[in-house]
């Protein structure tokens, strides 16, 4: 084990015995003032090096082996200088210690201090350190001895030249070695930095000078980079991997499962000190695992470390600047100026980044920066403590700046943080195409979560945004409730004029839900159309709903006109709305018997979905269903089966969506299934479509669709039956209604036959099925697969 040798004498006076060249042993020196901060180490005795550290950092990662980084330093043969730059707690010193344990060359270690800003003091420390590897000749010692208490420029220059000569001879006439200058950021004086620059320039390739600093030193690094003489490690290199974090946590006596470990590494961004402090600040592994993904910089141990190492040394101007900008997830000079009402934020950001105080530039031009997430947490905690009243105004200004830059997401986030529900609602409503339209992820719920239901209901814009967000997500009950709340809030609004866009939004909800039936649906859609401007994103949705209403009302020409406009007005902005309009047009063409044109419209619809990655959206169900029906009718069985399979996969995701949409989607899918001879699937789809139709007032078009589809199934069933007891088509039609609540008279009205005809045909069904009652006939027909008991 290496012994620590304390020496109090002057570095150019009486010296301990030198370490002999080629020795595998090691000796550590612990000095301050006149050299007590100097340590020299040889070989692999890492433990001795660690014991000899006089000024260790508050956190040490010495227990974690980091071979991936040491290997890079060992292989950097061309480099004469190794520069490690990172904020406190990244294990710079520990990494250098591990390198010393793996390198055959002797290491000479100088832990720099404020006194080394005196160039004479620094030269003495360098001379003493170099002398520990191999004794210096008398000329060097004489030059240093002549400096005295007030060295002249000529004397300093001569001493620097002597040191440079010694350094340049390392590996030629002197033994190659590695000279470590730790805490280089403490050097501020031009004279001291000039000494370091001379040492760096004189260092031969077979030796190394290793610089560890919190900031990038003002040396001629560009020249070194160009000459491939500089090997650099920064924050990204020193950030711990999950495996290294596992080692560090294990060294503290704890352990984490892989998922929790990765969460912890993510929250700390691999910052070794953060990982270590998190592992030590929790009494039990369960607590650490539970909090790994939610670790914050206001954790007591982490906040204390950040305050002591990062914030305490800052001047008041920089510290207040960091507090007040902690509301921002990214920083730029213009943004910070707007939020803080100042004009010099660029200077402060560059000063913080240059100081490597966990404020990181995000681009080479240094236009954007960000704080380390844990530092930002700690700063926000301090802002809440020291200036809580500023938070609302700071967020309000940030929201305005982002809105002016068309960054609606961040503008809304800051409006939520400011508690401004009205502004959030206006932002969402103004940018409806991005947040509220069909096919858009309903991100609105993220912003709604920042307000109580009472607050949302009091703001018409936000309540209506909530309504359309729930409509896009398929929650019709919530959509209707919030639309009603928006209408009530508008009624309470003291202003005489009700905003037309809000009136249109409420009318669109009414049209989509179609509670008043298809004619009312069309009226609501046309009222909304009249209220929105030509450039409004809502116009395309108005056209879709109006076109559907005219189609279902038996007015195909008016439907085509509206749907064509919907395709054009949604082009490039609302691809799902465009695809739905095209699918409706294809459906109308198919019903008119123009199958070729219908196929072209259907392919355009699926093309829109594919181009915008919307093929998995639940509202694409109808598009694929229409395509399957048309392809099956055209005898393109493979295409039909592919599209029908896609529609079936999306159907379960659709949930209880708008009733008219539900009926249309299931009806066309049933038609496709019939064409593909998938009769059981067709029965199930028609049964579900019939139930969905109950949610709407009487719709003759839907009744005709369903009756025609059932008739087609009856025909196929009749053709499949054989023998003298086979049911006729007429009897199959009667059988379909037997599971319902309808009386014989009501069945006759649906089929346009007399009650007596229904009775005679029903009794014929009983006889052929061997049943004596209606319920028994239903049970036996269901067992044979002729009907489903849920058929309506």
Image: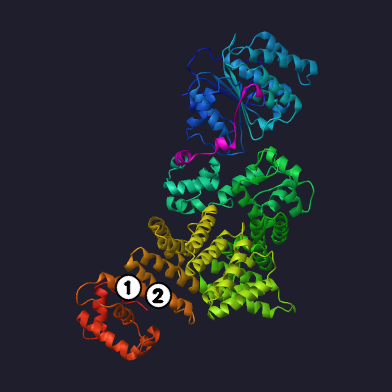
30 to 720, vertically: above or below: above
Q: Which mark is residue 715?
A: 1
Q: Nearer the viewer, residue 693 or 64?
A: 693
157, 434: nearer the viewer: 434
The front one of 116 and 198 is: 198
Q: Where is residue 648 in the image (x, y as percent from the top left)?
A: 40, 62
Q: In this view, does 20 lie above or below 263?
A: above
Q: Residue at x 53, y 28 (%)?
A: 97
Q: Where is residue 27 in the image (x, y as percent from the top left)?
A: 53, 20
| Label placed on residue 517 | none
Q: Is mark 1 on a helix, strand or loop?
A: helix
- The CA distance from mark 2 to mark 1 is 11 Å
Q: Can you identify the residue that label 2 sits on?
A: 708
| Badge 2 element | helix
Q: On the image, which quarter does residue 528 sit in?
A: bottom right
Q: In this view, does 212 lie to the left or right of 686?
A: right
Q: Can residue 484 be seen in the rendering of this structure? A: no
The image shows residue 142, relative to residue 124, as above or below, that is above
Tell me, yes or no, whether the two marked residues, 2 and 1, touch with CB atoms within 8 Å.
no
Left or right: 274 in relation to 725: right
Residue 239 belongs to the span the image colors magenta? yes
């Amino acid at each position: 084990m290496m012994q620590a040798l304390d020496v109090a004498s002057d570095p150019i006076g009486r010296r301990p015995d030198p370490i002999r060249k080629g020795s595998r042993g090691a000796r550590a020196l612990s000095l301050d003032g006149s050299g007590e901060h100097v340590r020299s180490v040889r070989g692999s005795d890492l433990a001795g090096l660690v014991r000899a550290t006089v000024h260790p950092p508050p956190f040490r990662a010495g227990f974690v082996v980091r071979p991936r980084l040491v290997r890079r330093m060992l292989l950097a043969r061309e480099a004469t200088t190794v520069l490690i730059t990172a904020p406190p707690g990244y294990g710079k010193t520990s990494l250098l210690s591990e390198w010393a344990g793996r390198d055959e060359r002797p290491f000479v270690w100088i832990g720099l201090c404020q006194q080394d800003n005196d160039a004479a003091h620094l030269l003495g420390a360098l001379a003493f350190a170099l002398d520990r590897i191999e004794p210096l000749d008398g000329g060097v010692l004489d030059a240093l001895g002549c400096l005295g208490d007030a060295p002249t420029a000529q004397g300093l220059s001569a001493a620097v030249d002597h040191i440079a000569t010694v350094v340049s001879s390392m590996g030629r006439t002197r033994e190659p070695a590695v000279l470590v200058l730790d805490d280089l950021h403490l050097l501020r004086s031009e004279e001291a930095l000039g000494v370091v620059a001379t040492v760096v320039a004189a260092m031969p390739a077979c030796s190394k000078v290793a610089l560890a600093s919190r900031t990038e030193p003002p040396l001629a690094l560009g020249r070194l980079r160009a000459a491939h003489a500089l090997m650099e490690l920064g924050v990204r290199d020193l950030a711990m991997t999950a495996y290294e974090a596992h080692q560090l946590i294990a060294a503290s006596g704890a352990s984490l499962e892989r998922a929790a470990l990765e969460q912890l590494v993510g929250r700390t961004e691999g910052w070794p000190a953060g990982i270590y402090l998190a592992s030590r600040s929790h009494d039990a592994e369960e607590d650490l695992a539970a909090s790994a993904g939610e670790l914050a910089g206001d954790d007591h141990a982490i906040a204390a470390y950040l305050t002591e190492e990062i914030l305490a040394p800052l001047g008041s101007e920089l510290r207040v600047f960091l507090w007040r900008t902690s509301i921002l997830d990214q920083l730029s000079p213009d943004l910070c100026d707007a939020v803080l009402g100042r004009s010099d934020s660029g200077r402060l950001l560059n000063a913080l980044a240059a100081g490597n105080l966990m404020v990181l530039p995000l681009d080479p031009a240094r236009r954007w920066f960000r704080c380390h997430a844990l530092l930002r947490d700690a700063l926000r905690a301090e802002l809440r403590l020291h200036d809580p009243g500023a938070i609302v105004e700071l967020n309000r200004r940030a929201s305005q700046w982002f809105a002016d830059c068309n960054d609606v997401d961040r503008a809304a986030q800051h409006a939520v943080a400011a508690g401004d529900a009205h502004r959030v609602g206006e932002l969402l409503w103004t940018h409806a195409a991005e947040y509220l339209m069909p096919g858009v992820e309903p991100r609105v719920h993220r912003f709604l979560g920042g307000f109580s239901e009472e607050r949302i209901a009091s703001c018409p814009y936000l309540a209506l945004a909530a309504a359309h967000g729930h409509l896009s997500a398929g929650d019709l009950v919530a959509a209707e409730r919030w639309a009603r709340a928006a209408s009530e809030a508008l009624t309470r609004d003291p202003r005489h004029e009700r905003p037309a866009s809000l009136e249109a939004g409420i009318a669109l909800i009414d049209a989509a839900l179609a509670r008043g039936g298809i004619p009312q649906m069309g009226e609501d859609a046309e009222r909304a159309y009249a209220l929105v401007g030509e450039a409004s994103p809502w116009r395309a949705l108005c056209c879709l709903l109006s076109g559907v209403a005219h189609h279902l009302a038996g007015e195909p020409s008016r439907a085509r006109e509206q749907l064509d406009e919907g395709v054009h007005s949604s082009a490039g902005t609302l691809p799902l709305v465009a695809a739905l309009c095209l699918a409706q047009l294809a459906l109308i063409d198919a019903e008119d018997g123009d199958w070729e044109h219908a196929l072209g419209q259907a392919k355009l619809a699926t093309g829109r979905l594919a181009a915008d990655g919307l093929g998995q959206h639940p509202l694409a169900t109808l598009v694929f269903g229409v395509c399957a029906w048309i392809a099956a009718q055209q005898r393109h069985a493979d295409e039909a089966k592919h599209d029908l399979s896609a529609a079936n996969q999306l159907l379960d995701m659709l949930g209880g969506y708008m009733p008219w949409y539900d009926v249309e989607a299931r009806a066309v899918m049933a038609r496709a299934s019939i064409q593909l001879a998938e009769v059981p699937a067709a029965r199930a789809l028609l049964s579900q479509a019939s139930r969905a139709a109950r949610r709407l007032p009487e719709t003759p078009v839907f009744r005709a669709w369903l009756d025609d589809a059932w008739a087609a199934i009856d025909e196929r069933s009749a053709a499949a039956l054989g023998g003298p007891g086979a049911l006729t088509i007429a009897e199959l039609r009667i059988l379909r209604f037997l599971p319902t609540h309808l009386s014989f008279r009501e069945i006759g009205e649906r089929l346009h036959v007399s009650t007596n005809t229904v009775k005679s045909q029903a009794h014929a069904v009983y006889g052929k099925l061997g049943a004596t009652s209606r319920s028994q006939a239903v049970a036996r027909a269901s067992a044979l697969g002729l009907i489903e008991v849920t058929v309506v």
